[in-house]
Image: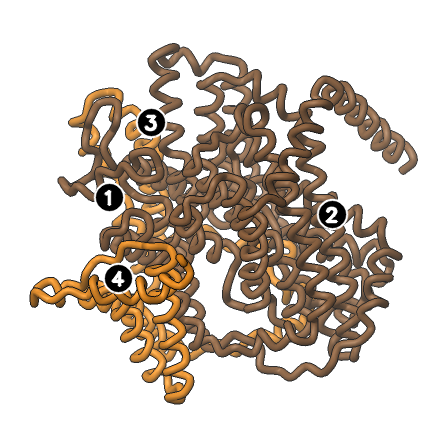
Amino acid sequence: MSSRRLSIAFTGALFLVMAWALWEASAWELQASLMAWLIGLPTAALLAVQLAREILGRPERAVPVEGDEPGLLDPSLAEQEAEPLDPAEERRRTARIIGWILGFAAAIWLVGFQFGIGLATLLYLKSAGERWLTVAGITVAVLAGVVLVFDCGMHIFFAEGKLFAWSGLTTTPLFNSFCYQVTSPFKG
Amino acid sequence: MNLKRSLGWLVFLAVLAVWIFLAQGMAGKIGAASLEGLVRVFSWPAFGYLLLGNLIGFAVGMLPGLGGPVTMALMLGFAFQLKMDAVEAFSFLLGMMAVTATTGDITSILFGIPGEGSTASTIVEGHPMAKKGEAGRALGASLMSSLMGALIGAGAIAVAIPIVTPLVLAMGTPEFFMLTVAGVTFVGALSGGSVVKGLAAGGLGFMFSLVGLDMQTATERYTFGTMYLWGGGETGGAGIGLVPATVGLFAIPEIIDLATKGGSIAQAHVGRLGGVLQGVKDAFRHWWLVARCSAMGTYIGIIPGMGGPVSQWVAYAHAMQSSGKHDRVGTGVIEGVVGPGAANNSTLGGALIPTIAFGIPGNVTTAILLGAFLVLGLRPGTSMLTKDLDVTFSLVWVLVVSNVITVSVCFLFLNQLARLTRIKGTLLIPPLLLFIYLGSYTHTNSFGDILVTLVFGALGWLMVVFDWSRPALLLGLVLGRLADNYLWITYSRYDFGFITRPGVLIILCVILASIAFPVIRDRRRQRAAETAP
């Protein structure tokens, strides 16, 4: 799909969300819906205008702005910019990082924060071609940060990973006991 | 020319007279609040948090690809998790932001890559100086002018308080409702790009703020029947937490950008840096230029939607024009380093003025900070200029102390600091993702926070791809709840007759002008571009 079509699809989706939001607000009493109507109606109108513009092929033209980019003031600076990426490579890298962002979230959901972050960090760094020493160092640092600073230090409640919950296992006593061992000398 | 200058002096003297008149009645109160603010910043643990914030800001400023606003969004959650009070939280958050522009100049000068978006102009003259072997001199000049600019910007807040206080005290609920709308409109219309898209993004932000259980009528608004979206979190009942949404909107697209562009961290080798003292002398030698550029930075900071990325280039253009060396652009002219250095540091002080007084943030950073105000129970406007004046002054002191500490540390460890920029981009991604997920998770300690971050991350990324204004959406989300309350009180009391109040009409005119201005400006530029040979 061309970028224009994608842009139209995005604006169209926003317009549909806004139309649904207004329809939903029609069922509420006045106090709850006043803001939705007062702001929602003009917003829906603006989105409709934008959508019409994009469909009719009249996107706002680029307006030259003084000092908008360094290259306008100093041509030599343009040379210092990184070379533009091949679009296919850019798409591949974008898909890869989006996959990793979702992967980190999935790992946290499945095995909990402490193990999930550690595991995902290890896999990410290894897949990026880092040396084992670097991978191990950063993974340990990240794990130590989560457990020592956030779990033991700040007492953030980390929910159990779904895999552990489903299998009836629990990691909370393990981390609680570890934190107790670590922090007890400081508590005197 | 003489008439113009005389008129300028006349206006300046008139403003000074008004200020002295207004400040007279508040002198004692301002003095006491200022002193209390200073004491609170130096008290423990606030000072510890300030140092921690400075340390993080230091690294963030120097590392290309990592922006100050993103880091602020990431750290927002921890400020609340640690149950910081207002001064502690601002020591940490503002302490972090206050130094990013200063250390960002280091990367710009040494490697020709902007450490921060607001330090790109320093490259034009600073990097050629580094290539000529004058990196130390450029850094000395940049750091000292940054410090001077930050001090002037911080001073501007203190000076503005007597002027804005009577204005704010004269306002009622209808005016405050209009101000929230004005804030979103300014950022939507003036932050560049399409006005229609900017305003629509602000409207969408307002609509997102309605998600949750309406406390007055117990109406479920856009909750899909899920308890998580009922809210009751830090945004006063709002279903969508400010922290997970902010982290998603700003941090996720940055991570994608960092990973897509590959390692953006500098790879070039830098030798030992000398001539720093000469640079410091240069900044003092051009003190009048520093003062002018700082004033410009402060002024641009006050205008919503502008900020560091604009002020640096305006200051650069002014510095080169007034130096009489415009034929030597890009050759390493010291004025071109001193001017932007001062301007981009004074901008934050300027941007804080409308944020504190009217709840209208000048830029993304202050939009996020405004969210922090609300979460901490501070209401911009009347209370921050009266009851919480000491907290307001603590912001001024945080700016001053942070910059003094940062510039001193920079001078002491410049050579060691330059090595920070050699960290590979891929190594940063796991710790950043950790902070993204942890930062959002701390909102309610549920996986729902992470889902909100992912949803807003996707939205933020699409907004970047299709050039929609994220700050406008965020500001709508931040101010939406306030606006909802103000609107209902206003409607209950005045019905729609509130629209005829003089204050409301004035703000309405300003809103309409802010929408018309960029449209007219763009048409003129377009016409000029079309008629140009």
Subunit that carries the residue with mark 2:
B
In front of the other: B440 or A170: A170
Q: Earlier in the sequence, mark 3 or mark 4?
A: 3
On the rendered structure, is B189 left or right of A138? right
Chain drawn brown in the picture = B
In front of the other: B88 or B180: B88
Say which colour chain A has. orange
- Say few, some or many: other residues with alpha carbon within 10 Å of mark 1 (under 14 / 14 to 19 / 20 or more): some
Subunit that carries the residue with mark 3:
A
Tag 3 near tag 1, CB within 8 Å: no
Q: Are marks 4 and 2 on the same chain?
A: no
Q: How many marks?
A: 4
Which picture quadrant has residue B438?
bottom left
Helix, strand or loop at disc 4? helix
Vertical placement of residue B498 versus B66, above or below: above
Q: Position of residue B248 (x, y in %)?
A: 36, 55
- Which residue is painted at 37% across and 40% down in the image? B477
Residue on which disc 2 sits = B294
Vertical placement of residue A7 versus B133, above or below: above
Which picture quadrant has residue B275?
bottom right
Asked whether residue B269 appears in the rendered view, the answer is yes
Mark 1, mark 2: which one is toward the viewer? Answer: 2
Disc 2 and disc 3: Cα gap in Å? 40 Å
Q: Position of residue B59 (x, y in %)?
A: 56, 65
Subunit that carries the residue with mark 1:
A
